[in-house]
Amino acid sequence: MTRFLLDCLVRAGMHDVVDVRPAAGGLAALAGIATRRDGPPVFVKAFDEPPADDVFAAEAEGLAALRELGGVATPEVILVDRELLVLPVLQPRPGGEAFWERFAHVLARLHLGTTHPRFGWHRDNWLGRRRQVNTWDDDGFAFFAQHRLLRWLDQPRVEAALDAGDRVALERLCHRLPELLPERPACLTHGDLWAQNVMSTEDGRPALIDPAVSYTWAEVDLAHVWTTSPPPEARRFFEVYAELTDLDGDWPARMPIIQLRQHLAVVAQFDHDWGAADQIRATLAPFRARG
């Protein structure tokens, strides 16, 4: 793996790389930290078989959008091409409630400051190895149903994991989304906000990586943090975020429905789904036909 990353860097013109060591965290792509003779170390990310030519260009654009439109700290792109993405090395996320409270302010500012009249994005981008369809829609419920939930049903691993009753239940849930979720405006979202994608700058500010941006409900980001085992100190994050955004007290009950999107994406892409299929079936159980 490290040899492959080194070869990608050399092909891209980075001839001062001394070695590459593996980096932990990502699931879909290969990643490493490259040591250089003539500069600081860099983070490098590549696919052994890129799913499309625009994967890293779309990710680089997402990093810039979060930084320029939402005021979020993201790494400046050093190099991007079809094969790889090269970024500055960020710091591991520090422990403690203070960091998570600071992150609550960052995420609330992003969501409150980027409201948009439509749902979508000006281009499709990528969630792991699968295309995220971002076709514009005025209706958030229709957008979420079509492009974030039902779009996964034709994926082979999803077809294998869900039975016919589950698929009908998902369609029934999608039809009832206006009853199940409050109407919310679109805003710029990170789109893949599990805890591993929250890191830190050298001066301790929260920084985000690996986005799959679009204008959609803010609770898409909140659900991802909520349901992907955040550390105990993150409790303060949710309290502060709710205060800053005037979030109603029923929001935790909505998280499993909104997180269906991410669970379906995980099942679609990985043989080991970390319990995502079980979570999907549990959320869909009330919508299965009785008989």
Image (cartoon, grey):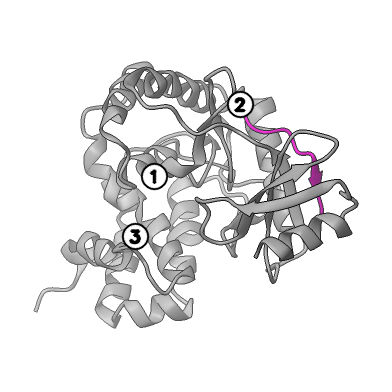
Residue 114 coordinates in the image, percent (x, y)? 58, 27
Q: Which residues are magenta?
A: 72-83
Q: Earlier in the sequence, mark 3 or mark 1?
A: 3
Q: Main secondary structure of the magenta part?
A: loop
The residue at the point 35 percent across, 57 percent down is 260
Quadrant housing the C terminus: bottom left
Quadrant housing the N terminus: bottom right
Residue lying farthest left? 291
Residue wearing tag 3: 175
The residue at the point 36 percent across, 23 percent down is 241
Q: Amino acid at mark 2?
A: Ala
**Is residue 161 inside the magenta stretch?**
no
66 lies above or below 287:
above
Residue wearing tag 2: 73
**Is residue 73 inside the magenta stretch?**
yes
Contact (Cβ within 8 Å) of mark 1 with mark 2: no
Q: Amino acid at mark 3?
A: His
Q: Amino acid at mark 1?
A: His
Q: Give the Cα distance between marks 3 and 1.
A: 22 Å
Residue 136 coordinates in the image, percent (x, y)? 62, 49
The residue at the point 81 percent across, 45 percent down is 79
Q: Residues within 10 Å of mark 3 (few under 14, many from 20)?
A: some
Residue 217 coordinates in the image, percent (x, y)? 45, 39
Q: Which mark is residue 90?
A: none
